[in-house]
Amino acid sequence: MTTSPLDDLADQTQQLLSNIAALATIDDLRENEAAITGRRSVLSTLQKSLGVLAPEDRKDAGARLQEARRVVEGALEDRRQELRALARVEVLAHDRLDLGDVVVSAVQWPASVGHPNLVAITQRELEDVFVAMGFTVAEGPEVESDWYNFEALNIPPAHPARGMWDTFYVDLGEPETVVLRTHTSPTQIHLMEAAVAENALPIHSVMPGRCYRRDTPDPRHLATFHQIEGLVIDRGIAFADLAGVIETFTRAYFGPDIESRLRPGYFPFTEPSAEFEVTCTICRGEGCRTCSHTGWIELGGCGVVDPAVLAAVGIDSDEWSGFAFGFGIDRCAQMRHEIADMRALIENDVRFLEQFS
Amino acid sequence: MKISLSWLREFVDLPESTEELREILDDLGLVVEGTEHVGEGLVDVVVARIDEIRAIEGADRVRLVVVDANDGPLEVVCGAMNISVGDHVPLAPVGAVLPGNFEIARRTMRGVTSNGMLCSATELRLGDDHSGLMLLDNLIDPVVGMSLLEALDITPDVVFDITVEGNRPDAWSVMGVARDLATRLGRPLAQPNLAHPTTTERTDSYASAGIDDPDLCGRLTVSVLRQVKVGPSPAWVAARLQSAGQRPISNVVDASNLVMLELGQPTHPYDAAHVAKQTLRARRARAGETLETLDGVQRPLAQSGRGLGDTGEDCVIVDGDDTVLGLAGIMGGASSEISPTTTDVLLEAAYFDPMSVARSSKRHGLRSEASTRFERGVDPELALRAAARFVAILAESCPELEWLAEPLDVRGETPASPTIAVFERDIERLLGVSIGLDEATRLLRGLNFDVTSDGDGLQVVPPTSRPDVRSGVAGRADVIEEVARLYGYRRIPRRTPTWSEPGGLTPRQKLRRRVRDVLVDLGAIECWTPTLGSDAEFDLLHRGVARVRITNPLASDESVLRATLLTSLVRTWARNYERGNGDIVVAEIGNVFAHPSVAGSPRFTRGGEGGSFELALPEESERVTVVLGRPRDDATTSVALWVTLAQRLGLDDVVVRTCDQPPKGLHPTRCASLVDRASGAVLGYVGEVDSDLVEAVLSASAPRRLGVLDIDFDALCDRAKATRRSEFASVPSKYPSAVVDLSFVTPRSLHAQDLAKALRGASAVVESVELFDVYEGSTLPEGTRSLAYSVRFSSSERTLSEAEVALARNELITAATSLGATLR
């Protein structure tokens, strides 16, 4: 039997393992790591010495060495985790602070200037305008069933009108039955259902909230955005009332020299439906690039609540009628501050956020 | 939809300016997204003949061309190689201004002067061929010197890009838009030329047609055309298609497209030679059948449906051997396509069930001009009219064309037209304005509604082109919308409704505003971080936890609904820190989501078709999270922030209590729960961010301590959980108060806040108790620390005597002793 460079491998491995076990701190380990598994380690030296073996023996020896390296590296990794955990325990013990003992009057509070978020500011202003007009504010969930987001709004399953909304589906239940709401309109349904159940009509509410559309973000669109929706259900409400409310809101929010106008549009949940436009806030109606030289900017959609929607929630359309409208909160913010790229809204760069108060 | 003004003018007289028309169209709900001027910049371009082509010394890319434009020989330098002597090409002389405001000037190259430019189709915006000059001999019989516009019979034109809403299938054609305009403007509407069968030979002697499934196919008409010569379309057809943004292909295909654009009826021409037994039938596809569509894709048919309402059905057209030829109303198959050798054509003009087309189109991810029209609803009575128009157009390029008599016309199920009663008061009630019945009748009749007067009301039957008009109450709204639209929304007066119910915010909304205001006042910058994140991000704090996943995310790192605001706020801080702006406090108020399988209280809601069953949806909870990242921030500044906030929110008694099992992401030994003492509810956590989380987010070791405050906003809004201070307000005593400092050695297990509370309650004359020092050290017994309080005594009746103060002091010491504290 010839001598092989690996004759002592078992002992050498054992020695390495006990060296590893003896490492006491994570710093220790970092210092000794190279000597145990690095290029100058015993294992690496043995690797180089395999060259002297006959080719037929080399394969077997290589495998044995490989196995030894696996064991040693495994042990080193385990030890690293142990030592890291120990170090963490030590740090945590050292850090321990009973927060019930904090003497608040002795805490030095660093000075910094805060800023509310632009979307929140805009939402609040919009809410305030509507509250002053006699509206309450209601909220609804962001994950909705197909019923609330579509069907109760007179958009039946598989209906081509669904193409108007690029929908994110939530992986719950049967495929494509739960969605991230594509608009705030489902909150209308919740509100009407609750009002019917509690016999609490009329409704005069606005509903702000976060919505989602599967639309690649660009300077004018975000996949996550905020809308505010309005709903009035009362006796004797007509299209003329909608036009009046839109006009009052427009002047209150944008200023006395900004006007609104309605033009025919289509939404499955309103009939008649309209798009509402306001005087371009950039050029004040003179015509500019922003408004494609029309002097008007499209802000949102609105209309008289469709009888099918009232039927879906069990409201008697002989007694009650109403209107609904909706538009983008972020869009209002973008218009007012002439923000070139909407994506700045979700970047959360302090240099952007600091501009709003 | 692109529609040229000249095309509209064929059907209605429109002397208005482009701007006026744009206004009118907008007001009709036919929104003009843009206008394009065709033929602009071609006024100066003329037809020129090439008389000589010479090489220029030292130039191999350009040559000198001598042309004649009826004005004597003219030398022009030209780079195109597709020309020979005798060709006729467009010449833009010096001074001409081409489309794009490109002015032609006299130029000198390599010692040769160029007196103008010979143009390609692209340069003139007359086509997309930019491989060489536009060779006029292929198109017309050119006359040298003639204006190009005249030569090509181009009238400068305006193309409107119009968006037609989903409820106006009737308006999705030139005729439909013209009809709206004619009605609004009170002008007559002209009709297009229609052909008549040219022979007495009956269609059924040549072809047959059938409908196996009348629910999917409401009408199938088949015309037979013979002596077809496939070739290019007449120039006006090509020009019309180009104005609509379509490419001319061949006279047969072009005629089909033109009819669709003009009348709104898609038709499909088949090469009769490749249709077995010259038979077309409509039926449901069977499982296992496949079709290679014109786009070259093999498509399995009758697959199982996806999503609510998808039955998985496909309606197909088959031939006499029952072989599938096409996906009905969506796209034809390759096998029976029109080819240059086609001589006999079967022309299909049909009505397919809109929902069936919509489902198939969505499932196959296949949309075509035809499918988008069918799914909105094509007029079922339009089919044969469209065929007659098709023949009239095709006949111009195939003079020998034969159209066999009595085209096949098989009927399935089509929607019945409702009869809707409309009274004047209905109009007034819905619109808030009175529109006379005579006016309403005129407007509706303009759109082909059948209107009869019935005493004080109208009986209205919508035309078959208006499948969007429903029956009953909903139908009444549909009809009145049409009246309002044609009458003009802008003429409807504005009315401001009033009601007696007050507006306002809910307590929750007020509290949210208050929290935001206080945080901002205290120096926090409010952020809006993404609701959707990656699995890896979710795993940082919730490894192994069920998550709410999006089935069709835009990107894989936006596929999971967040369960915490902490991770993304730390990320926000880290991003700003990396940019050198890390000395900030960031805060967010937002929703987090819990999968119904792990939610404390999943939300049950109506779901399924018709909202007919109960569905468990994710729990959505609102949290307020603050990350404090300024250089001196740590757990103590976080506590100070909380105490200030709690005071400002009027919380009565919420204690900061070290928690043994801090939530993941918080520093395990620097975290406390915020416990409402009266209710026992946990309102949130305060402490530091776990440095492991900071490291994971930053991919570097944590550069500083980050404080954190994480509030359960739902609990904060719940008065049963977050106890508010009583609204009773006491008037401070006018007598001086006595201040006594008390220092106790207490076991570590005794909470400083509990001792303070005990001190406050120990005597009636305690005005306030304030912790001012905590001392730990070797001089104190193991497991204890010293808590020092500043106590103020006062009475509303008199100045307290020394004896009374001493008595009260003793009462406080007794109370403290009973909790295990000893006076130091």
Image (spheres, rainbow, N blue to C red):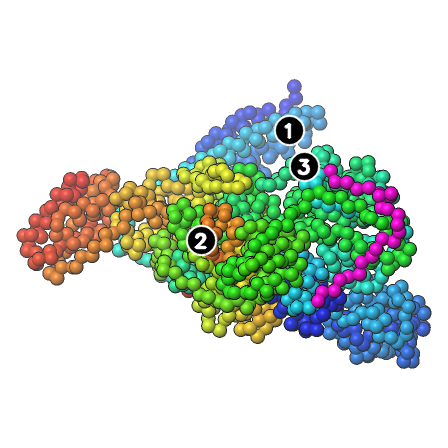
**Picture quarter containing residue B793?**
bottom left
CA distance separating discs 3 and 2:
46 Å
Question: Is any part of residue B13 visible from this angle?
Answer: yes
Q: Position of residue A117 (x, y in %)?
A: 44, 59
Q: Is residue B66 above or below residue B487?
A: below
Q: What chain letter is assigned to the residue under label 1?
A: A
- Asked whether residue B192 is drawn in magenta, I would say yes
- Asked whether residue A265 is drawn in magenta, I would say no
Q: Secondary structure at mark 2?
A: loop
Identity of the residue drawn at 90% across and 80% down? B71
Identity of the residue drawn at 50% across and 71% down? A258
Q: Which residues are magenta?
A: B188-212
CA distance separating discs 3 and 1:
55 Å
Q: CB of mark 1 within 8 Å of CB of mark 2?
A: no
CA distance separating discs 1 and 2:
90 Å
Q: What chain letter is assigned to the residue under label 3?
A: B
Q: Residue furthest top?
A: A1
Q: What chain letter is assigned to the residue under label 2?
A: A
B413 or B17, which lies in front? B413
Tell me the chief SS of the magenta region. Answer: loop
Question: What amino acid does circle 3 point to?
Answer: Gln
Callouts 1 and 2 in the same chain: yes
Identity of the residue drawn at 36% across and 54% down? B506
Question: What amino acid does circle 1 point to?
Answer: Gly
**Residue at image mark 3:** B303
**Residue at image mark 1:** A62
Identity of the residue drawn at 79% across and 77% down? B96
**Residue at image mark 2:** A319
